[in-house]
Amino acid sequence: MNISTRGRKIPPSPIRKLVPYAIDAKKRGVSVYHLNIGQPDIETPASFWNAVHSYPARVLAYGNSQGIPEYRQWLAKYYRANNIDVDENEILVTTGGSEAIMFAMLAVADPGDNIIVLEPFYTNYNGYAVMTDIKLNPIATQPEQGYHLPPAEVIESKVDERTKAILICSPNNPTGTVLTGQEIEIIADIAEKHDIFVIADEVYREFIYEGVHTSILHIPKLHQRGIIVDSISKRFSCCGARIGAVVTKNTDIMNSVIKMGQARLCPPTVEQYGAQAVLMQLSEDYFSKMVSEYKNRRDVTYEELMKIPDVVCKKPSGAFYIMAKLPIDDVEEFAKFLLTDFSMDGKTVMIAPGPGFYATSGLGNSEVRIAYVLESEKMRDAIRILAKGIRAFNNR
């Protein structure tokens, strides 16, 4: 029997596909530094756990398809504190940021339509595009320019009669790039000129080390064109809770995604209860302490990368990733080599190969995404091991 074309076409995750090699390495007694996945090691706030443990109902029932009203009210307060003027009726709670992205794609585009995306991008956009039967229309950004926007005319050249939206992510996964307010204005002007939407993945809003975060809903001309997709996974170290959101002031988009939400019944109930407790009890210095810790990790990681000859990498201004161009010719084989044939003092590293963060075939073959989600000294050790691994790989 044959499975669907969609089932055959959906790509494996470059973040997770090397897991079997990592398991084998550990079986051989090799310790693996996981730089491949954005899993924070900072503790989930105690308020989340306390709320989950004290969940008041004795039956775990279906919740509201749009999300628990009280939680959406607290979310609206959170957004307004970030100068994003929305109310609870302009928010749909989703099962993670993943569902939020797919709902946004489905709300703006039909099968065969396309969405412009800047590459490299969050790898699962590729999978969501296959699942929704929407084409990604990629525009490459360059490591030498810190992966910032190309000229406006380059972006406009990609717009055609089937283009329905521009998808951006700032601060960016995988590059750590923070788009400037001027860059967001350029995107807004293009969207207005060509009558298309802007979908903004703003999951890493708080992770800013230099500059400021500009949301698409800070731009008045995007109030009816803008769709924010969001998640608590990173900012509250709640990756397993699977709580995200679609935020939009466009009532047609909101009505559309609410119906999608009704089709899947409801987002996780207990986890919303926990997330609400976090928002209600968040200390004033929570984000400043978190950002300070990640900034230190970034600085250590970048410092060690710059010691490796011929590495091309700009210091990222946000998120907790660095995309680096390494002096190797096949990053897929190199990533595998690190787990199967190399170790230093009984340790090795697991990285995410660059090609999986592109839609254009052939790009990213010497690039790698590094997630600096480990303590600073572990990151320093991990990058030193990576440097030795590069030399060993090139000297085979």
Image: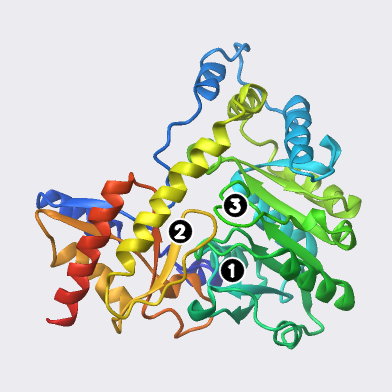
Secondary structure state at the residue bearing disc 2: strand
Using the image, determine if residue 79 lies above or below residue 253. Answer: above
The percent coordinates of residue 175 (x first, y second) are 50, 66
Using the image, determine if residue 171 lies above or below residue 109. Answer: above
Label 3 amino acid? Ser
Label 1 amino acid? Val
Using the image, determine if residue 49 lies above or below residue 39. Answer: above
Tell me which residue sits at (26%, 52%) in the image.
Answer: 33
Label 2 near label 1: C-beta < 8 Å?
no
Tell me which residue sits at (23%, 54%) in the image.
Answer: 381
The percent coordinates of residue 183 (x first, y second) are 72, 70
Residue occupied by mark 1:
130
User: Closer to the observer: label 1 or label 2?
Assistant: 2
Label 2 near label 3: C-beta < 8 Å?
no
Which of the labelled discs sits on residue 321, or is there none? 2
Q: Is there any visible trace of residue 120 in the rendered image?
A: yes
Which of the two discs, 1 and 3, labels the residue nearer the N terminus? 3
Measure the C-alpha gap from mark 1 to mark 2: 25 Å
Residue occupied by mark 3:
98
